[in-house]
Image (tube, grey):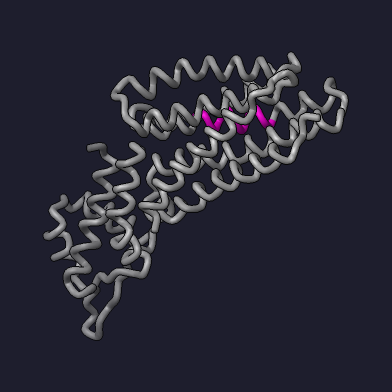
């Protein structure tokens, strides 16, 4: 059975971290309306939704709802939330070089990718398409400089892909990406807590 | 430094000027001390009023003073922390 207590625990902690990051930065955004803070917050809000939807997807499998029906339907919100989260994460770093309208491209991709996955009924395809986005993200993140914080952003991206990969039926190494994800969220949250007293 | 970051700084500078004048200053000296053009100052002034960072208070002789609101004080208090956060996360 794929649905286990550790999965529930991981999801609760991951979603809590994402929402905590979102709410901890709320006042800063409300005071400044600074776009970079907005994209950063939105990234973690959508990551929270994505991790929650991933758990729902595991539930669907655990209760053996026919895969041909429920699984692809739940792929749609999972794909949208995760793709837009990944987009906002990278965009929060590079938004100054692009117009506000670029956000529409992010939403376009966030709709297109899950629709393709839905039509093919494959979360592996969603994973592959998001991995392609990783190539673009790598160029955007590191084209100016390589810093620790940019490496942290990259880790959030890669660890999401690994966590999504572990939705698959034959994947037995969930513990490592999940532990690393929580570690990265802890680092990010503690850095935020330092400034948001 | 990018335009938006400058904007955050300018807002902080204007609010600091009001604060340094015992939270009460006429708009004309505020304009002079802010080192902005009249048109830029007007834009920021309207924005700060609209966002509720400052408010206008009229005294008995009909003169209009600018004072900080609680939100304005909060911005000043949090400004350095917010800039620290923006810099650390390269936002």
Q: Main secondary structure of the magenta part?
A: helix
Is A86 magenta? The answer is: yes
Q: Quadrant of residue A37?
A: top left
The percent coordinates of residue B73 (x first, y second) are: 31, 66
Q: Relative to residue A17, is residue A172 drawn left or right?
A: right
Give the residue displayed 38% in from the left and 63% down from the top.
B52
Give the residue displayed 63% in from the left and 35% down from the top.
A50
Quadrant of the snapshot with the C terminus of chain A: bottom left
Which residues are the magenta region?
A77-87
Q: Is residue A104 visible?
A: no
Above or below residue A64? Residue B18 is below
Q: Quadrant of residue B48?
A: bottom left
Give A158 or A144, whichever is nearer the viewer.
Answer: A158
Above or below residue A79? Residue B54 is below
The percent coordinates of residue A13 (x first, y second) are: 60, 45
Give the residue displayed 87% in from the left and 24% down from the top.
A66
Quadrant of the snapshot with the N terminus of chain A: top right
Above or below residue A14? Residue B66 is below
Give the residue displayed 12% in from the left and 60% down from the top.
B33
Give A147 or A68, whichever is nearer the viewer.
Answer: A147
């Amino acid at each position: 059975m794929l649905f286990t207590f550790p999965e529930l625990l991981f999801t609760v902690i991951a979603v809590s971290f994402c929402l905590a990051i979102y709410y901890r930065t709320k006042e800063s955004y409300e005071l400044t309306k600074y776009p970079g803070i907005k994209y950063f917050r939105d990234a973690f809000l959508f990551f929270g939704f994505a991790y929650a939807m991933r758990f729902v997807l595991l539930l669907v499998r655990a209760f053996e709802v026919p895969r041909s029906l429920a699984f692809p339907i739940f792929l749609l919100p999972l794909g949208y939330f995760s793709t837009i989260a990944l987009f906002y994460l990278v965009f929060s770093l590079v938004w100054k070089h692009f117009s506000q309208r670029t956000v529409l491209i992010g939403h376009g991709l966030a709709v297109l990718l899950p629709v393709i996955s839905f039509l093919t009924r494959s979360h592996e395809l969603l994973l592959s398409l998001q991995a392609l986005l990783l190539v673009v993200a790598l160029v955007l993140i590191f084209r100016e400089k390589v810093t620790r914080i940019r490496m942290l952003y990259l880790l959030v991206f890669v660890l999401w892909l690994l966590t999504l990969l572990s939705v698959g039926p034959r994947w037995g190494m969930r513990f490592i990406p999940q532990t690393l994800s929580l570690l990265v969220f802890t680092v990010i949250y503690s850095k935020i807590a330092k400034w948001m007293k | 430094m990018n335009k938006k970051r400058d904007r955050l700084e300018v807002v902080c500078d204007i609010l600091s000027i009001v604060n340094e004048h015992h939270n009460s200053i006429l708009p004309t000296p505020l304009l002079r001390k802010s080192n902005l053009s009249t048109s830029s100052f007007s834009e920021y002034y309207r924005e700060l009023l609209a966002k509720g960072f400052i408010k206008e208070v009229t005294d008995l002789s009909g003169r209009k003073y600018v004072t900080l609101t609680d939100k304005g004080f909060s911005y000043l208090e949090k400004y350095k922390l917010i800039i620290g956060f923006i810099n650390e996360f390269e936002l």
